[in-house]
Image (cartoon, coloured by chain):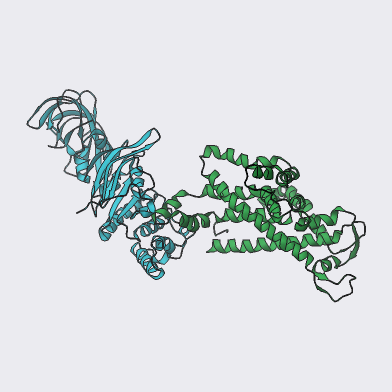
Chain colours: A cyan, B green
């Protein structure tokens, strides 16, 4: 089966500034694919290049096998949900939704019918004759979605569409968006800087930083097996410890932690020398005699769990998450504890 | 459109005490320098003319009678509709419309160009647009007359490069008048359109292109409707002063291309003038302008309500 979007070595330069350094990635048909990264990482530039709003300095963008890098945006069978929706302020909601179909020369009756269906899908049938300014932010968001989906694009591009909504609405829209993607069977490419959004909706995620794709994988892969420091640090919360690899044997590496502790971890191709180790806070447990010895510094109550900050012998802080449960004892500050690191929870990272 | 919850005057009493003295100078200015002259003009148009200019304080409809009715050379024939002045009005409307169209044609791309420059250089472009206005309108119009006259620099240059073999007759034509009006009022078109285009979000154009609209359709269906208030304001600001202009028609148009402004000016300039008639023509012009504004305001309100 042909891939929905294939980007080969895409470079984007503005004068001397390079926004994208040879990005390559493949987005499968019918996939919810997310470009995730901090602002300025090039994710929006990449999305705009797929839409056709930015030209491609070098490289290829293929849509179902066809190179579209030189096509004008109005000739690309993709539609966009804009960050601030960009609903036409002088047109009613239904005219907004029908606009793409009108441009495609769909007959008036057919496009009114299709637009009405789209509005029904986003639960806004009652608002068809309103102007965009008369709708709330969440409603405008749905109109933008209906407008972009009405012409049945091959790929739907979403540029941080939830960022302008408040938290409750954002959480509700995540579920709805994912549902919509599954129902329509259209490939979604979603841009966000919000890792929680990315993790909850995406089939696969490309983590971007400084114009490079750092890692592509499912939410679980990216969270549990980050390939480098940036990904480990950007996704979720983690303890990043500078370590020294002493020996590597049979895929196991022996490392020294700050304070002199030794730990056996899975090696991921690193040689002997200085590296970083990532340990997720929720993958450690307090025990009598664990892998590491530490002193509890502070305990913070967070509702579903408690955050424990413990210090290794040299003072390096480690964060732990303890589920709030009757079965888990809460350590008092100042107490010496042992920390058990789950097998596979500690990951050696490339820089 | 003040909807519910929009700012009403905050409180009773307490404010009013300060508000009245603060507004008094404004009201006085408007009253003395705006309303009073119009009132004076309205009154004069119903008085009897005195032979060496000025008026006699005696009620008369003679001025309006002269404008609308033809009673023959000696004033003893049955009245028919007088076309002379209506023709002047029609010509003025056509000239003003032509100048407005010319201003729009040149002003829109100019405003677009300025509004799409980087924010740092827009100020310079706007300044350049207003530079000619530092020179008196009369001087500029006379210079234009010099420029376009039969053996003026424009014709010399065109003949010099061999584009034409005989001088173009530009001076004393309708075109010269429209050119003069265009030159006089172009910034009034550029500035409001600039303000509208500057506020225009190019995300709308991107959204239109994303939904398969080409550039032309985007301009027609998205850009123009959204910046329309600026265009309408520009057209009104050019059309209305053009309608009553007298410098450009007098200096560039010649006797054949007489406009309302000149007609009014004549009535007050010479001892042959007719003050009540001049006042009446002014009243008729003002009524016409108010009708145009009223129709426009109605249309704008309808659009907002929609």
Q: Nearer the viewer, residue B114 or A300?
A: B114
| Residue B125 in which image quadrant | top right
Front-most of residues A189 and A301: A189
Q: Position of residue A181 (x, y in %)?
A: 28, 56
Q: Quick check: can you spot residue B236? A: no
Quarter of the rendering containing residue B174 = bottom right
How many numbered marks, from 0 up? Answer: 0
Picture coordinates of residue A44, whole percent (x, y): 35, 44
Q: Residue furthest bottom?
A: B78
Residue at 20% in and 45% down: A220
Query: Which of A121 and A47 lies nearest the eye of the viewer?
Result: A47
x then y, percent, for residue B53: 90, 56
Q: Is residue B95 left or right of residue B192?
A: right
Identified at 55% across, 61% down, the residue is: B304
Q: Residue at x 59, y 49 (%)?
A: B107
Q: Identify whether B54 is placed above or below A9.
A: below
User: Which residue is depicted at the point 87% across and 67% down?
Assistant: B60
Tell me if residue A186 can be seen: yes
Residue A250 appears left or right of B61: left
User: How far from the left and from the top, in percent, is residue A177?
Assistant: 30, 55
Q: Quadrant of the N terminus of chain B?
A: bottom right
């Amino acid at each position: 089966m042909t891939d929905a979007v294939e980007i080969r070595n895409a470079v984007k330069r503005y004068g001397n500034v390079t926004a994208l350094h040879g990005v390559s990635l493949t987005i499968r048909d019918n996939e919810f694919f997310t470009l995730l990264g901090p602002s300025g990482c090039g994710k929006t530039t990449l999305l705009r290049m797929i839409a056709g709003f930015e030209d491609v300095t070098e490289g290829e963008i293929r849509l179902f096998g066809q190179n579209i890098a030189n096509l004008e945006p109005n000739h690309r069978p993709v539609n966009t949900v804009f960050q601030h929706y960009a609903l036409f302020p002088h047109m009613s909601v239904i005219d907004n939704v029908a606009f793409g179909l009108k441009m495609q020369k769909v007959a008036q009756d057919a496009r009114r019918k299709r637009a009405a269906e789209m509005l029904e899908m986003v639960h806004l049938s009652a608002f068809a004759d309103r102007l965009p300014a008369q709708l709330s932010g969440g409603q405008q968001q749905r109109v933008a979605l209906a407008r972009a989906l009405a012409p049945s694009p091959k790929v739907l591009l979403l540029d941080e569409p939830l960022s302008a909504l408040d938290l409750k609405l954002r959480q509700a829209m995540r579920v709805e968006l994912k549902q919509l993607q599954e129902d329509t069977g259209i490939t979604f490419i979603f841009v966000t800087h919000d890792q929680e959004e990315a993790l909850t909706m995406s089939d696969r995620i490309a983590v971007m930083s400084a114009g490079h794709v750092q890692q592509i994988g499912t939410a679980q892969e990216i969270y549990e097996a980050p390939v480098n420091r940036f990904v480990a640090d950007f996704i979720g919360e983690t303890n990043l410890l500078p370590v020294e690899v002493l020996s590597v044997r049979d895929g196991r590496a022996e490392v020294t932690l700050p304070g002199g502790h030794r730990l056996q971890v899975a090696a991921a191709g690193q040689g002997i020398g200085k590296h970083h180790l990532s340990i997720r806070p929720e993958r450690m447990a307090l025990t009598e005699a664990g892998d590491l010895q530490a002193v509890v510094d502070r305990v913070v109550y967070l509702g579903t769990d408690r955050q424990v900050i413990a210090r290794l012998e040299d003072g390096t802080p480690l964060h732990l998450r303890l589920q709030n449960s009757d079965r888990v004892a809460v350590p008092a500050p100042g107490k010496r504890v042992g920390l058990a690191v789950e097998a596979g929870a500690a990951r050696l990272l490339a820089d | 459109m003040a909807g519910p919850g929009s700012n009403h005057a905050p409180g009773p009493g307490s404010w009013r005490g300060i508000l009245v003295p603060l507004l008094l100078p404004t009201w006085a200015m408007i009253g003395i320098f705006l309303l009073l002259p119009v009132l004076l003009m309205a009154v004069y148009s119903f008085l009897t003319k005195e032979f060496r200019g000025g008026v006699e304080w005696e009620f008369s409809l003679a001025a309006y009678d002269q404008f609308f009715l033809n009673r023959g050379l000696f004033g003893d024939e049955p009245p028919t509709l007088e076309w002379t002045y209506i023709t002047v009005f029609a010509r003025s409307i056509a000239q003003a419309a032509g100048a407005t169209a010319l201003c729009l044609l040149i002003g829109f791309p100019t405003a677009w160009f300025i509004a799409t420059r980087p924010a740092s250089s827009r100020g310079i472009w706007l300044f350049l647009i207003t530079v000619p206005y530092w020179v008196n309108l009369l001087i500029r119009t006379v210079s234009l007359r010099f420029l376009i006259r039969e053996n003026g620099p424009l014709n010399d240059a065109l003949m010099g490069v061999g584009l034409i073999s005989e001088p173009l007759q530009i001076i004393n034509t309708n075109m010269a008048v429209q050119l003069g009006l265009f030159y006089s009022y172009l910034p009034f078109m550029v500035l409001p359109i600039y303000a509208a285009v500057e506020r225009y979000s190019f995300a709308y154009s991107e959204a239109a292109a994303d939904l398969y609209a080409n550039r032309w359709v985007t301009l027609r269906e998205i850009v123009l409707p959204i910046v329309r208030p600026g265009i309408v304001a520009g057209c009104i600001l050019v059309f209305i002063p053009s309608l009553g202009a007298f410098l450009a028609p007098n200096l560039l148009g010649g006797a054949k291309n007489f406009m309302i402004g000149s007609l009014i000016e004549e009535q007050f300039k010479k001892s042959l003038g007719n003050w009540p008639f001049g006042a009446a023509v002014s009243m008729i012009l003002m009524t016409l302008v108010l009708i145009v504004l009223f129709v426009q305001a109605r249309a704008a309100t309808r659009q907002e309500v929609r």
